[in-house]
């Protein structure tokens, strides 16, 4: 696949990992915290040459968010879910997880708060091993996450 960026055709090798996190707008400082951790996870994985897909970075302005997210999840080998108290409130995350489960894509929940999933996401408690990352230092947990992703690729 090729992308046309600033008049240049660039070969897009695709991605291996989809990073899912709460992007809810508004007053939530937790969602901003989720976004910051998601970006740190993305940087750590990409420093190991593991190509990630993360919104909004990988959505071209003007493209349809829903179609882009569906395509990105389906093309992934691993979905990393940054899990916090905002996660259960996000319909986007519920949809991303449903797609991943339907396509049998490996899901690694990266729990950044000591809480349990509610609603639809409760299925993850029995479907996959969680990586708890709420005790400092975060870097140690990100390193473990990189190792786990490498194991599944």
Image: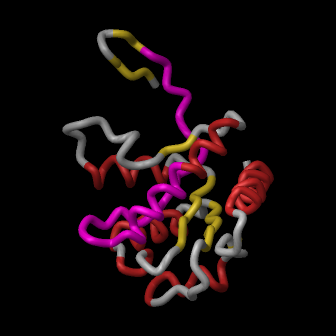
Instruction: Please indicate whether residue 79 sits to the left or right of residue 33 in the image.
Output: right
Q: Residue furthest top?
A: 8
Instruction: Note whether 30 is above or below 41 in the view shown.
Output: below
> Does the stretch in magenta take in 140?
no
**Quarter of the figure with residue 13:** top right
> Does the stretch in magenta take in 37?
yes
Q: Position of residue 90 (x, y in %)?
A: 36, 73
Residue at 66% across, 39% down: 50
Residue at 45% across, 84% down: 120
Instruction: Note whether 23 is above or below 73 in the view shown.
Output: below
Residue at 46% across, 64% down: 33
Give, as a single range, the part of the protein colored magenta.
10-39
Residue at 24% across, 40% down: 63
Q: How many marks?
A: 0
- Here the colouring is secondary structure
Instruction: Note whether 22 is above or below 150 in the view shown.
Output: below
Q: Position of residue 38 (x, y in %)?
A: 52, 55
Q: Position of residue 32 (x, y in %)?
A: 40, 62
Q: Position of residue 31 (x, y in %)?
A: 39, 67
- Between 125 and 55, the one nearer to me in the picture: 55
- Between 120 and 37, the one nearer to me in the picture: 37
Instruction: Note whether 99 is above or below 49 in the view shown.
Output: below
């Amino acid at each position: 696949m090729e992308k046309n960026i600033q008049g240049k055709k660039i070969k897009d090798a695709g991605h291996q990992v989809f990073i899912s996190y709460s992007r809810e707008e508004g007053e939530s400082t937790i969602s901003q915290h989720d976004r910051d951790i998601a970006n740190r996870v993305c940087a750590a994985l990409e420093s190991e040459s593991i190509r990630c897909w993360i919104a909004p970075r990988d959505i071209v302005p003007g493209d349809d968010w829903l179609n882009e997210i569906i395509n990105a999840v389906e093309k992934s080998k691993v979905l990393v879910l940054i899990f916090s108290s905002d996660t259960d409130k996000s319909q986007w995350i519920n949809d991303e997880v449903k797609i991943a489960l339907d396509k049998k894509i490996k899901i690694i929940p990266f729990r950044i708060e000591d809480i349990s999933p509610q609603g639809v996401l409760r299925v993850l408690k029995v479907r996959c091993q969680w990586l708890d990352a709420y005790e400092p230092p975060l870097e140690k947990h990100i390193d473990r996450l990189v190792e786990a992703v490498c194991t599944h690729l």
